[in-house]
Image: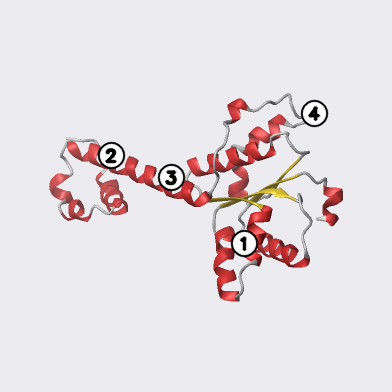
Amino acid sequence: MTDLNPADVKPRLKALGLFGLIACCDQIIDKPWLRDVLAIEERERQKRGFERRARDAHVGAAKPMADFDWAWPKKIDREAVEELFSLSFVKTGHNTVLVGPNGVGKTMILKNIALQALARGHTVRFTTASDMLAELAAQDSSSILARRLRRYTLPHLLCIDEVGYLSYNSRYADLLFEVVTRRYDAGKPIVLSTNKAFSEWGEV
């Protein structure tokens, strides 16, 4: 006899799509192999889910944070950066901005935050600002643009790298504002990196 909670078994089987086992649940609830079947199926489901989310996230290759050189940036709030990996801001919907000059590891931090969110079961989209805005601006109909916008507004977390590296025309600026506004209204956070101090954002 297993120590499975009978009240939990049917919902777990349903979540896994094992409807044949649901139909005979009363007959198999005490079978010693049921716990192993559930564990194997749930582990595989989690693996496939992570692989699907990672594929959709487009994070790409990333060095682990264990390789990050905390001594290289002249000034960095290590405690604040490490707190980001708790992902508490995802629950609250608060946005985060990583500001610093080129070559100090902003992209590395951003990618690792994205990977941490994926590992925690969140949906993520990683992109550079130029790639996102070029894709959106290229759409020639409102219906196609609406579908493309959902790529950046639906995920739990949006990571935008290299904001402000290039100046944006009014079309790009409007699209960036649209993405930010939609995510704000939905309570979904953005983490972005930029080499522009806040005092320079009027030039973006």
| Sequence order check, earlier mark of 4 and 1 | 4
Horizontally, residue 46 falls left or right of residue 109, namely left
Depth order, front residue of 108/117: 108
C-alpha separation, residue under disc 1 versus residue under disc 2: 40 Å
Residue 100 visible from this viewpoint: yes
Q: Which disc, if any, is residue 74?
A: 4
Outermost residue, top side: 71
| Sequence order check, earlier mark of 2 and 4 | 2
C-alpha separation, residue under disc 3 versus residue under disc 2: 15 Å
Above or below residue 2? Residue 125 is below
Above or below residue 146? Residue 46 is above
Q: SS at mark 2?
A: helix
Residue 3 drawn at (x, y percent): 24, 36
Disc 4 crowd, CA 10 A, few/some/many (<14, 14-19, 20+): few
Q: Which disc, if any, is residue 40?
A: 2
Depth order, front residue of 74/183: 74
Q: Amino acid at mark 4?
A: Lys
Q: SS at mark 3?
A: helix
Would you say the residues marked 3 and 2 are in contact, meaning their CB atoms lie under 8 Å apart?
no
| Sequence order check, earlier mark of 3 and 2 | 2
Residue 198 drawn at (x, y percent): 83, 48
On the image, numbered disc 3 is attached to which residue?
50
